[in-house]
Image: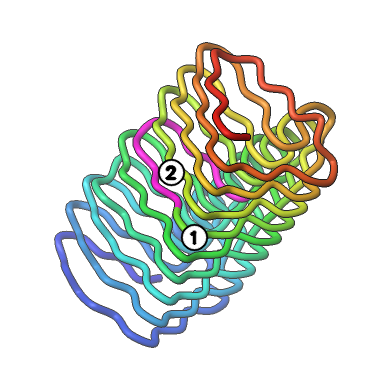
Amino acid sequence: MISYADVNDSLTKLRLVNGYVDGNGGAIVIENNSNPIFYICELEYNSCTGNGGAIWCNDECSPVFKTNSIMYNYADNSGGGLYLHSNDTILIDHTSVAYNISRYSGGGVLSEYHNCLQLFNSILADNTLLNGDGGGAFIRQGYVQIDNSLFSTNSVIGNGGGLQTSYGAEVDIYNSSFLTNTASGYGGAIYFYNGVDLNMENVRFISNSSIKGGGIWGYYGSTISIKNGLFTGIIPTMIHTAMEMEEL
């Protein structure tokens, strides 16, 4: 395992495979105001008993992940690929987060508590959540911007096959697609609740499925704005919230 504290290194073409930690961060721990840059790195088949099968990031850090592969990792708690907790701005760009598994929340990515997460030109695919919410990603609080990204074939025994967001998070999604994500509960593509502000433009929802809200399910004082959205396939798209729908 690699641990970062108070450092600003740049790592290129790093490959970390088959790491194991009894705790958090199967391959990498980033903490204490560190700002490392990971470029063309492979983090695969790592695991931990806690959070962050590949990466645990905590305490006012601003890492950059560009053109990476974060695949086949496992967390016995939350964040199968990445667990991002109480940080500053985090950039994930041109990165594949795929085939990761977690037991509770965020099969691919978990981001919580005042992060600013930027997810650009990336793929979250085939991640699995065994019991909880957010097969592809779980977002609690903070601000998230998603642009030109794909959430595909993520699955959850719970809610939010592609994405779950809650507790006052502000989420902007542009030019992205949610394809064939599944949830055993609500929100095949997206599940949101408890004061979330969800804004989407040019977003496609194709063949997502769940018990209710095959595309989107939301409630508890949240708001949603959709411009130029496309819904096809399985779409019992039920949204229980204060809602603004434009050009759907």
Residue at 49% x, 45% y is 110
Q: Position of residue 33 (x, y in %)?
A: 17, 53
Q: Amino acid at mark 1?
A: Asn
Q: Position of residue 103 (x, y in %)?
A: 66, 45
Q: Is residue 246 above or below residue 37?
A: above
The overriding secondary structure of the stretch rendered in magenta is strand
Q: Is residue 20 left or right of residue 155?
A: left
Q: Is residue 17 left or right of residue 145?
A: right
Of all residues shown, which one is farthest toward the bottom? 13
Q: Is residue 199 visible?
A: yes
Q: Position of residue 78 (x, y in %)?
A: 56, 45
Q: Quadrant of the C terminus?
A: top right
Dot 2: what SS? strand
Q: Quadrant of residue 184?
A: top right
- Tell me which numbered mark, 1 or 2, is placed earlier along the sequence: 2
Residue at 53% x, 38% y is 227
Badge 2 is on which residue?
Answer: 111
Q: Is residue 83 above or below residue 28?
A: above
Badge 1 is on which residue?
Answer: 148
Front residue of 227 and 184: 227
Residue at 33% x, 59% y is 91
